[in-house]
Amino acid sequence: MGFSGFRVLKEGLFGQKGWTPQWRNPDPKDEYDIVIIGGGGHGLSTAFYLAKEHGMTNIAVLEKGYLGGGNVGRNTTIVRANYFLPGNSEFYSHSLNLWEGMEQELNYNTMMSQRGVINLFHSDGQRDAFARRGNAMVNQGDDAELLDVAGVRKHLPYLDFENGRFPIYGGLLHRRGGTARHDAVAWGYARGADQRGVDLIQNCEVTGIDIEAGVVKGVQTTRGAIRAKKVAIVTAGRSGQVAAMAGMRLPIESHVLQAFVTEGLKPVIDHVVSYGMGHFYISQSDKGGLVFGGDLDFYASYAARGNLPMKEHVMEAAMTLMPMIGKARVLRSWGGIMDMTPDGSPIIDKTHIEGLFLDCGWCYGGFKAVPGSGYSFAHLLATGQHHAPAAGFRLDRFRDGVGLMDEEGTGAQHNLH
Amino acid sequence: MRINCPVCGERDRREFYYVGDAVALDRPDRDAGLDAWDSYVHLRDNPAGLTRDLWHHEAGCGAWLVVTRNTGTHAVSDVVLAREVVR
């Protein structure tokens, strides 16, 4: 059943009685062509593009909890294509193109809001780095504008421009960047996949992966054994545990990344703004809450909550940059579990086990990658060939040291990303 | 999170620098081969539960510490000097 403004009006007039569930709730079959482990944003978009682009519908998505209940349900919702390095750059560019067509493609209001992303800089050296990044973005076919102080002032008049220690020198504006409604993205892909015949199976935890003579045969779950020709692991945050069921160790350490939401306020912050001299970035949700976050806590963690030092840093950075938000009250904070790879870039690849595939290592950037990751992973699953925009996301780049994508330039080792 | 340094006593997490899994103490031989080095530098068990980390008390006594910690709760159950582990 399609969604439209007309239907919203009609259902409003007739007591909202015509709405039906957006997807089925099927029991698992004995066998599928492809089993996708993980019903988050990436798993659901993978299922959707397998059905839509490759005509494959004998597929199950197995989710241990409820659909979209992991990191896609709790993140800072930012969408952008401002990556610098080859390998990352073309992937996020492709993903942003998919974001722009997503609402029509899914017939779903994902509240995509291209409000612009502004990365502030605070020194001549930082300006050079952002000018270079902007050029790389333009060369990739995306948009970037270098703003001087007057330019930033026009967009963000509320900042503390004359801060004694970190005055603002300008900003890099990426107009096509913005935010989207994170839950709606998961729901939209779920509905689209279900409509095409994909079985979305919730409360179904995978407890084992069956492998015979180096070939994957299926999975064991809390709802029985399921045979499959191919098995796709899309469980960022828990990738290590799932891969261990196949006897694999991954180049991943799970870390905690905190974010915060204030009470709802009238519209005050129109863009996505990031601070260049501290770990702080912010946007305002359509409900009015200020959504902001910082950097990793920098120790391995599955606790889904962080410690006070990073909270303190984020609040200090916020007050340094935009003192006006000091009166807003923080409603809640949370910590996401991040699959951190040594170079801070993701993995979409086959494994040494035939029929077993990996989509993981999304570090702190998984949300903006949801459509691109699903599209490229579906291509790999269906054709056995790497999709060009994601061809750099190889598992063996760490072992061989070739093709590392260290976007921050800090070195490809675990405790630096 | 507070870490009980065997030299200095219980101190705030901010005084310590996290290096990562204590696998860092099991350095392979120089000619152990690519797989052994890949495993040492990159691959991790990444347990959800008890883990052994290597931390540096950089804003304190400068000691290297092996910290046994629960990644699900952040509870620190044991801290020993790395040099005693390696010995």
Image (cartoon, coloured by chain):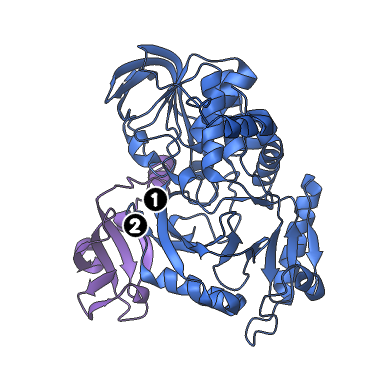
Chain containing mark 2 = B
For disc 1, the neighbor class at 10 Å (few under 14, some 14 to 19, many from 20) is: many
Assign a secondary structure to mark 1.
strand
Colour assignment, chain B: purple
* Residue ID for mark 1: A254
What separation in Å lies between label 1 and label 2 (alpha carbons)? 17 Å
- State the mark number for residue B24: 2
Numbered label tally = 2
User: Residue A193 placed where, x, y %?
Assistant: 54, 23
User: Residue A302 placed where, x, y %?
Assistant: 33, 51
Residue at 61%, 47% (x, y): give it.
A180
Residue at 30%, 81% (x, y): give it.
B61
Colour assignment, chain A: blue
A269 sits to left or right of A15: right
For disc 2, the neighbor class at 10 Å (few under 14, some 14 to 19, many from 20) is: few
User: Residue A43 placed where, x, y %?
Assistant: 49, 32
